[in-house]
Image (cartoon, helix red, strand yellow):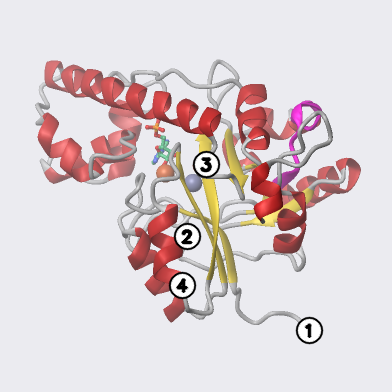
Amino acid sequence: MHQRSNKIDLHVHSTASDGILTPSEVVRLALERGLNVIALTDHDTLGGVAEAQQAATGTELKVIPGVEINSEGEWGALHFLGYYVDPENGPLREKLQAMLDARLSRARKMIRRLGELGMPLDWDEVRTLAGGKSIGRPHVARALVNRGYVETTQEAFESFIARDGPAYIPRPRLGPPEVIQAIVGAGGVPVLAHPAHSGPAAVERVPEFVSYGLRGVEVYYPDHSPQDVEKLLGLCREHDLIATGGSDFHGPGIEEGAPLGSVYVPPGCVERLREGRGYRAPTGRPSPYTSQR
Ligand code: AMP
Ligand code: FE
Ligand code: FE
Ligand code: ZN
């Protein structure tokens, strides 16, 4: 039997990063839609997971702890999803904290640059939009819209803050091997997010990422074509990778991503992710995280 409507969404953002619903509001919406599993995958932070899990306690909904880590450089955009990471894992927390700090100083620089370009913004205004958490270019884009400098966030990116834009400031990022190893080291399952959306280089490098420990690929994604899906399913078969799917929901009315629960997720996907979790120490001893389940 085909599922008529999807009950799972494995790629969801909240106000812990650049989504516009709080983790509790995301959970409420997921329950309204009759979902039974979501993974909260905010950019560079696990800060929303506890609230979402708390809000889902005693309901039909399971919240998988997740994170989306951006690894981007001269090679282009690459995003990795980490499922079932231990939010208390020290090395992962340190790496994420360093990225959050770098995001703050980079946002300040972008605001300064935009001021020089004749579009002054207040630091506090952008900070407030970001809720003081994982601040990113989407927050800057929304501030530019609020001030009337541009019509849409898309225009803000295209005219000013996309990679080749005049107010783009890069931020320090981890390389792909470091991202994958940080996720694995925290007991998580690393999955390459939306490879075809990121670009051909992301798709071509799947075998290399497998050599670092990649376990899955986000095959089903709002703007992946049927050809993209075929190609990615082929890579999953060839390398024994878990095929996942997710909407990249950022909130109602937000251009990025698609509605919560609107993207197909293959049967058995969540079970395979769950089986793949748990850091296995080199000695063969299970970590405390694995044994406490
Ligand atoms: P940052 O991590 O601060 O560099 O911002 C990256 C985020 O900006 C991505 O995760 C997307 O949410 C968003 N983004 C990147 N490029 C664009 C674009 N061209 N149009 C709209 N949103 C974008
Ligand atoms: Fe985002
Ligand atoms: Fe992404
Ligand atoms: Zn995302």
289 drawn magenta: no
Crowdedness near tag 2: few (<14), some (14–19) or many (≥20) residues, C-alpha within 10 Å:
many
The tag earlier along the polypeptide, 1 or 3, is 1
On-image quarter of the C terminus: bottom right
Locate residue 121, reporting x and y percent.
Answer: 11, 30
In the foreground, 156 or 136: 136
Q: Could you tell whether 241 is left or right of 174 in the image?
A: right
Residue 68 is tagged as 3
Q: Could you tell whether 144 is left or right of 208 in the image?
A: left
**Three-letter amino acid code of the residue under disc 1:** Met
Residue 57 is tagged as 4
**Three-letter amino acid code of the residue under disc 2:** Ala
Is residue 70 among what the camera can see? no
On-image quarter of the N terminus: bottom right
Q: Which residue is mark 2?
A: 258
Locate residue 84, reporting x and y percent.
Answer: 61, 50
> Where, by quadrant of the figure, is residue 144 drawn?
top left
At horizontal 79% and vertical 32% (from top left) the residue drawn is 210
Q: CA distance from mark 4 to mark 2?
A: 26 Å
Q: Are marks 1 and 4 in contact (CB under 8 Å)?
A: no
Q: Which residue is mark 1?
A: 1
The tag earlier along the polypeptide, 4 or 2, is 4
The tag earlier along the polypeptide, 4 or 3, is 4
Q: Which residues are magenta?
A: 208-217
Q: CA distance from mark 1 to mark 3?
A: 32 Å
Q: CA distance from mark 2 to mark 1?
A: 25 Å
Is ligand 4 closer than 8 angstroms to the Cβ of mark 3? yes
Q: Are marks 1 and 3 in contact (CB under 8 Å)?
A: no
Q: Is residue 153 above or below residue 92?
A: below
Crowdedness near tag 1: few (<14), some (14–19) or many (≥20) residues, C-alpha within 10 Å:
few
Q: Are marks 4 and 2 in contact (CB under 8 Å)?
A: no
